[in-house]
Amino acid sequence: MISTGNKIINNLSDYEKERTSFSWETVGRDLDLGPEGSGNNITHLAVDCHAQGKLKEIVAFRFINKDKTWEDFSYLRLKEETSRFANVITGLGLQKGETVFSLAGRIPQLYITALGTLKSTAVFCPLFSVFGPEPVFQRLHKGEAKILVTTLAIYEKTVKQLEERLPSLRNIILTDIEEHRSEKILSWKRLMNEASPDFQIPPTSPEDPALLHFTSGTTGMPKGALHVHKAVLTHYITGKYVLDFHPGDIFWCTADPGWVTGTSYGIIAPLVNGVTSVIDQEEFDAMRWYSILEEQKVNIWYTAPTAIRRLMRMDIKPREKFKLDALRVILSVGEPLSAEAVLWGEKNFGMPILDNWWQTETGGIMIANYPAMQVRPGSMGKPLPGIQAATAEVTEDGLKFIKENGKQGHLVLKKGFPSLFRTYLHEEERYNKCFVGDWYVTGDLAKMDEDGYFWFVGRADDIIKTSGHMVGPFEVESTLMRHHAVAEAAVIGKPEPSIGELVKAFIVLKPGNEPNEDLKLDITGFARKHMGPAVAPKEIEFVESVPKTRSGKILRRLLKARELGLPEGDISTLEKT
Ligand code: AMP
């Protein structure tokens, strides 16, 4: 860090210069990465190397409890706890490359599970604790979970009923029971107490699988995007350039690790950069959030448009009620951040909110507004040094790059950066379909202006973004069709200002069922029970039929156009009913 008096000099102060001289090899050398060795392991770089050096006593994680008291984990304590966990799972017979899942809120055990699993060279996969049994089953099944870490309450409510359908799930570790219940259902406390705090990290190749994140698909069940240890290079460099970490910084990433942001930036990036993270175990509450910013003297705050919109609506003038002098950088990701929100940040915090873009598959931030660069409100910013982004038409003959400024096309990224996913688990064909030549086609539509800033246009597919969650319509439709009265279902995202899009289902009933309010309530209850409130439809409409192509695919695009009163577009493949 270079600090002149109170003024901090941003890590990325000359974007163009850095972009020209950047190489991933240099970042690898900075982190001392080699071909094989424990030094390549994410947890070595995030925790152990700091615990052996001068950051040993520095707080790595501060977990804030409901009553605002907190529990600190220094880098040294985190090293010991994650070593204990690595010993626990190794002792349970877990092999390199096998998968440990977590299903819990933002409790310390989740974070220890993540880092301890990586340390052992097994693969870590976090799930949202708000998921109902069906989404949990789909993911545990596809990810071939061997060990699951969860709480007693979630186990009783969600997991217990799935156990028979998950024969390869060998152990369930409950964070809050005192004693083991059986050979399978084990007590975290007991296991951790009996484990040694020393663990020798096995040799790790930069290409060894590390993290599995599920993301929603349009046509099938969720896809498991697999990332490798080398992704840490992106976490490290984006922490430096985009989040602008400096020694001594207090960072708050509000995302849950169930979403990739809460892992890449809620766990790995701040640790690799040796800063302190605060983690609030509670859900959004405007006054609580502002008071955490004040009391914890947060310097860098990474959040999402869905929270920003809620804060904007409440019209609290934060700087009149709270002392927020420590705040230096505010960032947002996950959905489009309106120009109005960027300016609201300027007015209410004295700094613009910096939008950035990335997705589960890219593992880390790809396009960003940087603290030292002129912000264009409403734009996602410019590609990270080391990342080549473009807009293109996808044609039968390959990509046709768009030359005209401001013309919309598919947002594509050149392959070859460390955090790009390596596969969709067990779905090589689905994975291959994402690539055209040397380019990864992101599924988003964007425009680029004359100065190289990217502007988000929308998704190229039917995936719904609701309150920051990616929801695949197919997954919701499949569950709805298990309700006794439902013959067919088609699901779309309907724009809704406060949550981005709401999940709306069009339902065709089986003969003999009356389309009335009681049935709507019953189907809603069924959906919430099986999928959880984050995924279940918020709106249901009964219809006589759903539009389909001649080959039988639901034309969600047409349903959406009709819903919004927009032109219907090309309906040549529509099946006449
Ligand atoms: P996820 O994989 O759940 O993180 O979702 C990734 C998707 O969220 C992207 O493909 C975009 O559709 C959307 N997204 C993420 N960041 C932004 C942003 N800054 N502006 C607009 N959309 C975004």
Image (spheres, grey):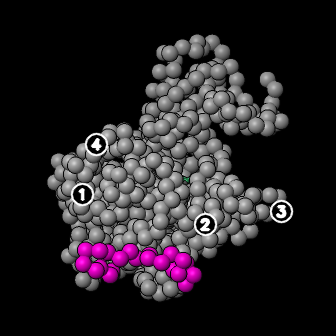
Label whose residue precedes the other's in the sequence (2 or 1): 1
| Label ID, residue 452 | 2
Mark 1 belongs to which amino acid?
A: Leu
Figure check: 309 above or below 324: above
For the N terminus, the quadrant is bottom left
Residue at x 62% of width, y 31% of height: 564
Q: Nearer the viewer, residue 387 or 316?
A: 316
Mark 2 belongs to which amino acid?
A: Gly
- In the rendered structure, the answer to whether residue 26 lies left or right of residue 513 reads left
Figure check: 311 above or below 325: above
Q: CA distance from mark 1 to mark 3?
A: 54 Å
Q: Secondary structure at mark 3?
A: loop
Label whose residue precedes the other's in the sequence (4 or 2): 4
Label whose residue precedes the other's in the sequence (3 or 2): 3
Q: Nearer the viewer, residue 447 or 105?
A: 447
Label whose residue precedes the other's in the sequence (1 or 3): 1
Q: Secondary structure at mark 1?
A: loop
Residue at x 54% of width, y 77% of height: 16
Q: Position of residue 548 (x, y in %)?
A: 74, 32
The residue labelled by disc 3 is: 397
Is 406 inside the magenta-drawn segment? no
The residue labelled by disc 4 is: 316
Ligand 1 within 8 Å, label 1 CB: no
